[in-house]
C-alpha cells in the first residue's frame, strides 16, 4: 500500500516509467539503450542496456523502497540522475516487473520479479552483460489509474518525447526504439550538434545560433533558433540542468522574455539549452518526478539566459531563417502556378509576357506582332521614381557592381510598391521594405532606452498603497526605475509616491503599473516589466514611423535600406517575428530551370 501511494507520484504514466528506467541505465554507465513498447507502454515496456549490471544481492535491495547506492551524506550534492530509491518498488507495485542483470565478468546473470507488489525470489538468468527490465500489464490491478491514461497513440508519443529529451542530454549514448505501436527510431552516438539534428532536424541546426555564456560560475550552452524559425507552441524547447532534462517555468519564462522583442505572442522559439552550475546552487529534490528544479539565485539564472540569448540574436545581425527561401523555391516549381479564370483575360500562367513568347513561336491566339512589338513594355526605366508596380529600376552600373558583394546585394527592382528585388553574388534576395525599415527604426528607438529616458512630472504625486514587503522591494529598485523615467519613493511603511512617469508611455494607469512591477520583483527579483512595456511602445512607434507599404522608392533609397539592414542587429525579422527578407541561391534558381 505504501509503494502504491508512492507510485501515484513516481508512475504517472508509461512515459514516467521509461524516464526512471533510462535514468538508471545511464547512471549504470550504459552507452547503448534499447527500448521496446507495446500498447503505448501499457502492455509492455522493455529496456535493455549494457551498463555495469547487478548481482543477486543488489537485485534484492533494488526493489526495496528508498534503497539506493547513489547518495552521499549531502543531499544537495546530487551528481546522478536518480537518487531517491523509489522508482523500482513503485513500478513493481502497479505492474508485473522483471529485472534480469549480469555484471561484466560474472558466469551468468540473475533475475528477480515483483508481480503487482508480490516479490518473486531471485533466480539464475541467461543474458549478456548489462540489465534487462520488463514492465507488463501496467495498472492492471489498479483500474482507477488505468482509465485515466490517454490513447495508445498519445502514450506512445509521450514515451518518444521522453526518450528525445534523454537523447539530447546524452549524445554519446545510442538510443534505439521499436515496438508494435511505433516506427523504429535509432539515434546513433555522435556530437551534440549531430544529435540535435537527429532529434529536431537539420533545418533547426542550420537556422540556430550557438549559445555559450557564463556568469558567476553558471554556464549556459546550446543552440537557439533564429526568431524567424519559430513554432506555434513551446514543445520544441528543451532545457537541461547539470545534464538532467527538466520542465521548469523559470527557464520557459526567461526564453519567452528574451524573444519577446522579436516574436508575436502566439509564436514560440525553438531551443536546446544546457545550464551547468555547482550542485549546491540548485535543488533537484523538489518533486519525486525530478522534473522541477529550484535555483538558489533564480534572478542570476534568468539574467544569464535573457542576456545571452538577446546578445546572440543581436550578433546574428540581418540573418533570417532559410525556411523562407525553401518555401519560395517550392512555390516556384512547375505546376504550382495559380490558375487564372479565363474571364480575367489570362490565357497563360505567365500573363502578357507568356502570350508574347507564345506568339514568337507561332502559338495560336497570341497578340499580333510577336515579342518584338511588346518588348518595350518590359524594358527598364532607369530614371522613373514613380514607375508602376513591378517596374525594374536598377542602380547605376558602378553602384551595382560594388553592392553585389554586400550580403543583401544591389537593388534591381521594386514589386507591388513593397518588395525590393536585390541581386547578390550568390543569387537573389526579396526584401519586405516596410518590415525591414520597421526593425531599423525600432532598434534606433531601443538604443535610446540605454540612456536615461525623458519623464513627465505628475502635477500631483500619485500614492499607491502596497504591502510593506512590496514597498521595500520597489524602494531597492528605485534607481533602476529612475533610469527608465519612473520616479518613485517610499511613502510610509505601506505606500509609494510616484512623482514622474516615462514620457514615452503617455497617460497610463500608474497604480496598475507599480503593482505589476512589485509582483515581478517578488517573483523574479528583476524589474524587466517596465522596460518591456517601454519597448512595446517603441515597437508601436516604429511600426507607424517606418516606410509604408505602397511607397515607391528610388534606386538609391532601396540600396540605402539594404545597407542599413546589414548594419542593424536583428534586421532579419520584423518586430512581430516575421522575416524581413528571403533568399534564393543561384544554384536553386538554375535547378528550377533544369540547368
Image: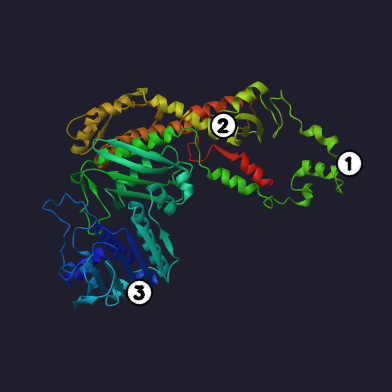
Query: Where, by quadrant of the figure, is residue 380 drawn?
Result: top right
Could you tell me if residue 254 is visible in this image?
yes
Callout 3 touching callout 2 (CB < 8 Å): no
- Counting from the top left corner in percent of width and height, residue 18 is at 31, 64
Camera-nearest residue between 475 and 338: 338
Query: Where, by quadrant of the figure, is residue 24 drawn?
Result: bottom left
Distance CA(mark 3)–CA(mark 1):
75 Å
* 3 or 1: mark nearer the eye: 3
Callout 2 touching callout 1 (CB < 8 Å): no
- Counting from the top left corner in percent of width and height, residue 220 is at 31, 41
Q: Residues within 10 Å of mark 3 (few under 14, many from 20)?
A: some
- Residue tagged 2: 408
Could you tell me if residue 13 is visible in this image?
no
- Counting from the top left corner in percent of width and height, residue 345 is at 79, 47
* 2 or 1: mark nearer the eye: 2
- Residue tagged 1: 368
Distance CA(mark 2)–CA(mark 1):
41 Å
Under tag 1, what secondary structure?
loop
- Residue tagged 3: 43
Q: Residues within 10 Å of mark 1 (few under 14, many from 20)?
A: few
Under tag 3, what secondary structure?
loop
From the viewer's perspective, is 584 left or right of 76? right
Q: Residues within 10 Å of mark 2 (few under 14, many from 20)?
A: many
From the viewer's perspective, is 192 left or right of 418? left
Q: Earlier along the polypeptide chain: callout 2 or callout 1?
A: 1
Under tag 2, what secondary structure?
loop
Residue at horizontal 24 percent and vertical 60 percent from the top? 28
Relative to 323, residue 112 above or below = below
Amino acid at each position: 500500500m505504501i509503494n502504491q501511494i508512492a507510485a501515484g507520484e513516481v508512475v504517472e504514466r508509461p512515459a514516467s516509467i521509461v524516464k526512471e528506467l533510462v535514468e538508471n541505465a545511464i547512471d549504470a554507465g550504459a552507452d547503448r539503450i534499447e527500448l521496446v513498447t507495446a500498447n503505448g507502454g501499457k502492455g509492455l515496456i522493455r529496456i535493455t542496456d549494457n551498463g555495469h549490471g547487478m548481482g543477486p544481492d543488489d537485485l534484492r535491495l533494488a526493489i526495496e523502497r528508498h534503497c539506493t547506492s547513489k547518495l552521499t551524506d549531502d543531499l544537495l550534492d546530487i551528481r546522478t540522475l536518480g537518487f531517491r530509491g523509489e522508482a523500482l518498488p513503485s513500478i513493481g507495485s502497479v505492474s508485473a516487473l522483471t529485472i534480469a542483470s549480469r555484471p561484466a565478468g560474472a558466469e551468468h546473470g540473475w533475475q528477480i520479479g515483483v508481480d503487482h507488489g508480490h516479490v518473486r525470489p531471485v533466480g539464475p538468468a541467461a543474458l549478456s552483460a548489462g540489465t534487462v527490465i520488463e514492465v507488463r500489464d501496467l495498472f492492471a490491478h489498479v483500474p482507477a489509474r488505468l482509465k485515466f491514461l490517454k490513447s495508445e497513440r498519445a502514450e506512445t508519443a509521450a514515451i518518444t518525447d521522453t526518450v528525445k529529451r534523454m537523447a539530447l542530454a546524452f549524445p554519446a549514448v545510442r538510443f534505439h526504439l521499436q515496438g508494435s505501436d511505433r516506427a523504429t527510431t535509432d539515434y546513433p552516438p555522435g556530437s551534440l550538434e549531430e544529435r540535435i539534428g537527429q532529434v529536431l532536424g537539420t533545418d533547426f541546426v542550420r537556422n540556430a545560433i550557438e549559445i555559450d555564456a557564463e556568469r558567476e560560475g553558471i554556464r549556459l550552452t546550446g543552440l537557439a533558433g533564429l526568431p524567424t524559425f519559430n513554432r506555434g507552441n513551446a514543445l520544441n524547447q528543451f532545457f537541461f540542468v547539470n545534464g538532467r532534462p527538466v520542465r521548469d517555468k523559470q527557464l520557459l519564462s526567461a526564453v519567452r522574455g528574451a524573444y519577446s522583442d522579436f516574436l508575436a505572442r502566439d509564436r514560440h522559439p525553438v531551443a536546446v539549452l544546457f545550464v551547468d552550475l555547482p550542485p549546491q546552487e540548485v535543488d533537484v529534490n523538489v518533486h519525486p518526478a525530478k522534473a522541477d528544479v529550484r535555483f538558489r539565485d533564480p534572478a542570476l539564472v534568468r539574467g544569464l539566459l535573457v542576456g545571452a540569448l538577446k546578445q546572440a540574436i543581436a550578433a546574428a545581425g540581418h540573418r533570417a531563417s532559410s525556411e523562407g527561401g525553401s518555401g519560395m523555391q517550392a512555390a516556384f516549381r512547375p505546376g504550382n502556378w495559380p490558375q487564372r479564370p479565363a474571364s480575367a483575360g489570362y490565357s497563360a500562367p505567365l500573363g502578357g509576357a507568356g502570350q508574347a513568347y507564345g506568339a514568337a513561336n507561332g502559338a495560336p491566339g497570341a497578340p499580333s506582332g510577336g515579342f518584338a512589338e511588346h518588348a518595350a513594355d518590359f524594358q527598364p526605366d532607369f530614371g522613373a521614381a514613380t514607375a508602376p508596380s513591378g517596374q525594374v529600376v536598377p542602380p547605376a552600373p558602378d553602384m551595382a557592381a560594388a553592392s553585389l558583394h554586400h550580403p543583401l546585394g544591389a537593388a534591381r527592382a521594386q514589386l507591388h510598391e513593397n518588395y525590393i528585388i536585390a541581386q547578390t553574388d550568390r543569387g537573389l534576395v526579396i526584401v519586405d521594405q516596410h518590415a525591414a525599415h520597421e526593425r531599423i527604426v525600432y532598434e534606433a528607438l531601443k538604443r535610446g532606452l540605454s540612456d536615461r529616458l525623458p519623464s513627465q512630472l505628475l502635477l500631483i504625486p500619485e500614492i499607491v498603497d502596497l504591502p510593506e514587503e512590496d514597498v521595500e522591494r520597489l524602494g531597492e529598485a528605485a534607481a533602476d526605475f529612475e533610469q527608465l523615467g519612473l520616479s518613485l519613493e517610499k511613502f510610509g511603511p505601506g505606500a509609494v509616491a510616484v512623482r514622474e512617469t516615462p514620457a514615452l508611455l503617455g497617460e497610463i494607469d500608474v497604480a496598475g503599473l507599480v503593482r505589476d512591477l512589485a509582483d515581478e520583483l517578488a517573483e523574479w527579483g528583476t524589474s524587466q516589466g517596465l522596460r518591456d512595456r517601454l519597448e512595446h511602445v517603441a515597437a508601436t512607434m516604429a511600426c507607424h514611423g517606418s516606410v509604408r507599404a505602397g511607397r515607391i522608392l528610388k534606386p538609391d533609397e532601396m540600396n540605402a535600406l539594404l545597407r542599413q539592414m546589414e548594419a542593424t542587429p536583428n534586421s532579419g525579422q520584423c518586430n512581430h517575428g516575421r522575416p524581413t527578407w528571403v533568399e534564393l541561391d543561384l544554384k536553386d534558381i538554375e535547378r528550377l530551370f533544369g540547368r
